[in-house]
Image (cartoon, rainbow, N blue to C red):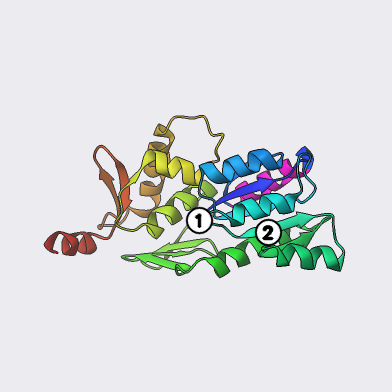
Amino acid sequence: MRILVVEDEKRIADFLCRGLEGAGYAVDAAPDGRRAIEFAAAANYDLVILDLMLPDMDGLAVLEKIRNRKASPPVLILSARGAVDDRVHGLEQGADDYLVKPFAFVELLARVRALFRRGQPAPERLQVGDLVVDCMRRKVTRAGENIELAPKEFGILEYMIRNKGRPLSRTMIVEHVWDMDYDGLTNIVDVYIRHLRGKIDDRFPAKLIQTVRGIGYLIEAPAEEALARKA
């Protein structure tokens, strides 16, 4: 899942980015409204966390621009404007939720997850063969055995399993799991795929993560792959 944080106070922006990345999300940060609009036009975000008091424009103007896009992600307003009228106005303008500063990060994280549940029609319990991923609890099991994954490993696995059977390029994986400013080469994906295979494939007879030569990777149960070929 990829989140855009729109916040001009660097201390708060850094705090949000660190916390969300620690929870396994890919995060981009925009310090003003203009760049927030540019970021939203350049990438498909799963959620926007939006401050209202930005240095160059009112956050509600940014909200309007986001809402006018064909693909509009959920928007969580995070603002020091805590009056009832402000909250009501923000929600009426199209925000999906409104959290007043100062805030507890655990509450923000709970609201983020609630917005993902609300806006995500895909099931939160994903499965490929005997591999089961609980996206809300961030738990992974295979053949009933618990598997511990690092946040980025979980992010890659969740992205792949939500696109089960679809070849994903290394660039697609980097753009979805890492933030926009990630300046490493896409071969970092190969490193993480090796880690994932070591945890979810190597000890099991059926291999789920497949290499697609010249493209990247896909995840698919062997039986599903065979049925697809017959079709």
In this rendering, position of residue 202 left or right of residue 70: left
Residue 180: x and y in percent read 55, 38
Say if residue 202 shows up in the picture.
Answer: no
Q: Judge the density around disc 2: few (<14), some (14-19), many (≥20) Cα neighbours within 10 Å.
A: many
- Residue at position x 40%, y 68% from top? 144
Helix, strand or loop under label 1? loop
Give the residue type at disc 2. Answer: Leu
Above or below, 112 relative to 177: below
Q: Position of residue 112 (x, y in %)?
A: 64, 60
Instruction: Say whether residue 34 is visible.
Output: yes
Of label 2 and label 1, which has the lower sequence position? 1
**Residue at horizontal 62%, vertical 67%?**
114
80 versus 55 height, above or below: below
What is the three-letter code of the residue carrying label 1? Lys
Q: Which residue is mark 2?
A: 76
Give coordinates of residue 31: x percent, y percent: 71, 39
> How far apart, in angstroms, are the residues tagged by discs 2 and 1?
18 Å
Residue 54 is inside the magenta segment = no
According to the picture, the residue beneath numbered tag 1 turns out to be 70
Q: What is the span of residues highlighted in magenta in the rendered image?
A: 12-23
Look at the magenta stretch and give its main secondary structure: helix
